[in-house]
Amino acid sequence: MSGARRHAAGHWTLALLLAAGLWAGTAHAADPAPLAAGHPKFLGNVLSAKYDPLFARYWNQVTPEDAGKWLSVEATRGTMVWGVLDLVFAAARQQGMPLKQHTFVWGQQEPRWVAGLPPDEQRDAVEGWMRAFAERYPDVAMIDVVNEPLHAPPSYAEALGGAGESGWDWVIWAFARARGLFPDAELLINDYGILCCAPNRARYAELVALLQERGLIDGIGVQAHGLERVDPAVIAANLDALAALGLPIYVSELELEASDDAEQLAMFQRVFPVLWEHPAVAGVTLWGYRAGSIWKRNAYLVDWFDEERPALQWLAAYLRGEALD
């Protein structure tokens, strides 16, 4: 497994760094450390183009929310739009935070022009998209190479090999290309319905094992959507089963939604320790935290007036090792 991470600094401009400082918020000596500071694993969140001066106060890992998706970059064939992604990368570099690219191959938010191409052009287009990203962001730390293979395969899966002999040749193709283009990044897969449901987890583990046999994967991404009512023992059992593969697990896309503060607090107290304390979990990434800027309306942790909900107050105390009821 490669695992090493480059932190090359030559190809972004001073203007971008200054823009990132204005946009993402510049850290000062008096600012509090991120919630997971001092821990051996990260607690991250998503960034978009929106000004967010609080991000570095809470989080120490960055994932572009939409800017890293193929549709966002190349909605028109041959025209790459990198502006927002440049800002996200510059902000992450400025704060010294690892960035995880999300995502290269996904059946949702793919450019509309791809489906109508002949198979050879589809394959070339996918590889061209990945290559262009590699040339622009060689220092990316982690990559969700394929997102939701169990639930949302792309329209061009057959062009990448389809099921083939392995049952997942199209996924293997994508990871093989990513390994060649990103030898120093951690290559991850990502899907939902894994931590709740043993049949999904078993099928997912089979796919991970195929990639592992070929030396193409460095970590297992598990989306944490929809865990509000899942028994923590079930979550733990599915984490244990994945951990048996011997790869680090990256919990992604976590949010716990409740309009009632006490209900949301109880959810975090019930679910988060199971994820955070599992020895195979190398990091947890939330999927938004600000009211009005999160895809599940009532999953926010900071309200419209920058006030913290009780769940976030508890989370901060938990990570400091303090008791807070």
Image: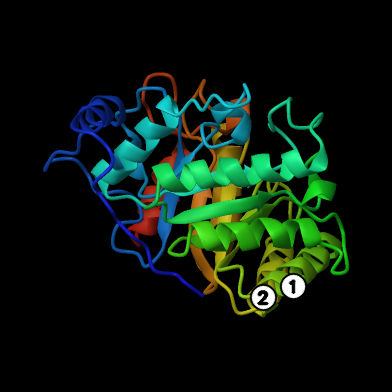
In the image, residue 115 lies at what x, y percent? 80, 32
Closer-to-camera residue (59/248): 248
Say what amino acid the circle numbered 2 marks: Arg
Q: Which residue is mark 2?
A: 214
Q: In terms of image quadrants, where is residue 231?
A: bottom right
Closer-to-camera residue (154/120): 120
Residue 259 seen in render? no
At horizontal 29% and vertical 29% (from top left) the residue drawn is 53
Q: Is disc 1 placed on a helix, strand or loop?
A: helix
At horizontal 42% and vertical 51% (from top left) the residue drawn is 140
At horizontal 75% and vertical 69% (from top left) the residue drawn is 205
Mark 2 vs mark 1, CA separation in Å? 7 Å
Q: In terms of image quadrants, where is residue 184?
A: bottom left
Q: Is residue 276 left or right of residue 188?
A: left
Contact flag, marks 2 and 1 (Cβ < 8 Å): yes
* Label 2: how many Cα within 10 Å (few below 14, some 14–19, many 20+): few
Q: Is residue 37 left or right of residue 292?
A: left
* On screen, residue 303 above or below 289: above
Q: Is disc 2 placed on a helix, strand or loop?
A: loop
In the image, residue 174 lies at what x, y percent? 67, 55
Q: Which residue is mark 1?
A: 210
